[in-house]
Image (cartoon, rainbow, N blue to C red):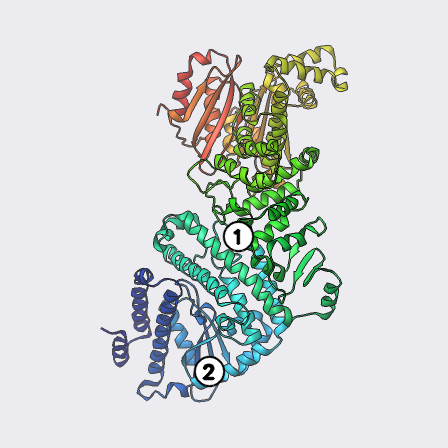
Amino acid sequence: MDITLQIEDLIEKKGSDFELSKLFKEYIKEYKTSLPALFEKNQGKDFLVRHTKKLDSIITLMYKTILRRVFGNYMPMRSSIPIAIVALGSYGREQLCVHSDIDLLIVYKDIEGYNTQLIIEKLFYLALDAGLKLGHRVHEVSDLFKSADSDITIRTALMESRFITGSTYTWQASQSELTKIRLHNQKEFILAKVEEAQKRRKKFPTSMQPNIKESVGGLRDTQLSLWIAQTIYGVSSLKELSGVLFSEEEYREYRIAIELLFRVRSALHLIANKQEDRLLLEYMPQAAKMLGFKDERKMVTKVLQAQWRINNFTQIFAKKMVRPYIADMHFALQLRRSRIAKGMFEYNSRLYASYNLKYQSIEKLLTILLNLEDKPYQFDAGFLAQFTYATISHPLCDATYTLLRKLFERKHTYSFLKLFNDAGILHELFANFRKVMHLPQFDGYHNYPVDIHSLKAVYALENIQEPYIQQLFDELSQEEQTILKVTTLFHDTGKGRKQDHSEVGAKLIVGFTKHLHFSQEHIQRAVTLIKHHTTMSSVAFKENIHHEKTLYKFMSGIKDSKNLQMLYILTYADINAVGGDIYNSFNSNLLRELYHSALEVSQNNGRVSDATKRLNIEKRVKRLPEFQAQSRIFQKKILNVESNLFFFRHSPSDILKIALIAKDVKSYTHTITNEDSLKIEIFRKIPLNIGYLLAKLRRLDVGSMEIFTLFNGVKYFKIEFLQTLESAELNEIEQIIDEAFSVTQSIELENITIKREQLSIDCNHSMTHAEIKLTTTNQRGLLAYVMDGFEQLGINIVTAKIHSSKHRVRDMFLMEKQNDICNNVENIYKLLTKDN
């Protein structure tokens, strides 16, 4: 039965408001269940328009129903009732997504006899009871201007108004007010919207899980352009400015990008069954399938490409609209005094270009950049336009490559590379980037797509924060610094293929570096660096960097100390470009330790045995004035500490510092530092329940752990975590440490699952130590469980390296060969795997 007839039947039977709202609710629910099928046939703007029109019909029917309830069979003409129902926001633009709020404006005239307040109230109750998500405003016609003038949000919403139903006379009167609103304080409104957009864009930067609505290049940016165009030109659509402000082709590409975002956003709402504008990993497989993409990565690449297109268009043409409108004559005079080329200017390290300037060749533009002072720059939209539409001939000529070489020789190249990326010509100048533009990296590690990550790596290289690494960079020759910068930019360009990206990237860089006329020696260094650009971090974070086998294997690929020096700097830049807090003091220390250990290996022609290495360290300890001031007996105790690793892992001054604390220990003592990350050092003579301690701290991520037997029965524990804590939490840590020395304290360990094949035990690791490697799923309380097992078996762990991601852990433990443990390896397997 048709819903209109059902409503009429209910009204005739004097049905209740509840029955009416239930009827509408079931009708709306049935419509929503049909949306996935509708989406299959009509995607993008067409789907949104159809959805909007359907809601128009529902709201119109609700209004008609309320009028029938209020006036009965004596209902006046709809136009004579001084109420207009108006769509606002995305609903007004006919872009309303499935689970977005339905923004309505009810505008009325308070004319005696029509009881407008009652009608409006009943309409809202019916809509809300029927399950519509309304965001609504109610204004008298005469109140519109005052309300809009007092609140920019109201003014913005009113600019996107669209008549749905009600009195056409009231709507015409409202339109007169809306015109007054549009023409009032236009400059202030535009500047406020631009400032608002700048804050939003900082909050929602480019991401591999983009916010389709709010991110840079999202749908909000398209609305900004429309608001500006409506305010200045009075147009209802940007299309009206095609051929005036921008070309038909530019607008067509812009519209194609918007269409994809419409499709993706609608798919997200349908998948999540709620208002969800973030393209999260969990939604990607289903979204890709709904939108007809072969895989998620291809879909995200297209989305990021679309957001780049929208951002580029918005940056250039929004500013083109605004610039003459808000022109400041005083500023214009200042610009003219800082001319760098015809129609181009530099002011406060920002480069400007006139929109009236003809687009130029890339060679001329690069020459202008190279003539500038060597410092970072920002770029106005007019300057961005010049590079976006620059003439670039392919293949690039020798003159272009010469200019690019000079660009890399500057201390500050990053801002120009970012300009190329923002202008969409990065892959035009550096062909190696063609397959990695906007390419996401869903590896649980990187936070940015390949192109953005590569640029951020160059930024990290040009802005080194660690003095020691800066010193190493400064020691490089001009040509070495330049080839390192090129390598840093190109290090991930081999991604997006089936083969290992390091091998592919190494092949790709050869052609480009030849065009730049680097020597064969430096080209080979670039090849080596790209082949091994992930090796240093992998070895530092996952392996025993004090074992000579590890060091010699590492250096066998790196070849020489110069490559090692450059790889260390590249690794620093690469990790800093990942995003988040991946590069921290803990990782920094590991990389520096590996660099020094590997450097020692690279500078010795013969193999350096552990014994020789220890003797060298002991000599350095003996030379310390503080050591010489100690008694002969105490000196002997320090030098007789059995573990070589204790000497390898600590500097001479730290060895003495640790020994001095251990000397005075009666039962136990500890120190807690919480600067770059939380570190706990414990010296004990009485038993410590390490399993209890780690179990109580299992909410924190452990980075590494050292356990060394010193002298006088003192054992030294050092646990480094990846996080810092609030100062108020440190008292709790103190209490937990004290509890770990109490024999009465116990804690139930987590139920941990380790499979036998995930555990490997190497008793041939060295003469004195065996190595245990654990690779398994990341489980809460895993380390506490493992250490408790070692305690039960009487295994003396001297060091542990913990490497964990969101889903996997790769832990390495060194244990002393004692208690005949290597003849009873099966006991370790049985206890830790529970005989799985």
Q: Nearer the viewer, residue 816 or 522?
A: 522
Q: Is residue 718 above or below residue 506?
A: above
Q: Tell whether 155 sits left or right of 85.
A: right
Q: Are marks 2 and 1 in contact (CB under 8 Å)?
A: no
Indicate the quadrant containing the C terminus: top left, top right, bottom left or bottom right: top left
Tell me if residue 690 can be seen. yes
Where residue 109 sits in the image (x, y, percent)?
48, 85
Identify the secondary structure beneath mark 1.
Answer: loop
- Count numbered badges in the picture: 2
Furthest toward the left, the residue is 1
Where residue 128 sits in the image (x, y, percent)?
39, 69
Q: Tell whether 704 sits left or right of 366.
A: left
Find residue 186 and report its image quarter. bottom right
Indicate the quadrant containing the N terminus: top left, top right, bottom left or bottom right: bottom left
Name the residue beneath numbered marker 2: 171
Q: Nearer the viewer, residue 197 or 241?
A: 241
Identify the secondary structure beneath mark 2.
Answer: helix
Q: Is residue 639 above or below residue 231?
A: above
The 10 Å Cα crowd at callout 1, few under 14, some 14 to 19, many 20 or more, is: many
Name the residue beneath numbered marker 1: 206
Q: Which one is earlier in the sequence, the residue at label 2 or at label 1?
A: 2
Nearest to viewer (mark 2 / mark 1): 1
Q: Nearer the viewer, residue 156 or 793?
A: 156
The 10 Å Cα crowd at callout 2, few under 14, some 14 to 19, many 20 or more, is: many
Q: Nearer the viewer, residue 102 or 515?
A: 515
Where residue 654 sits in the image (x, y, percent)?
68, 24
Q: CA distance from mark 2 to mark 1?
A: 41 Å
Where residue 487 sits in the image (x, y, percent)?
58, 38
Q: Amino acid at mark 2?
A: Trp
Tell me if residue 586 can be seen. no
Q: Amino acid at mark 1?
A: Thr
Q: Is residue 227 above or below residue 256?
A: below
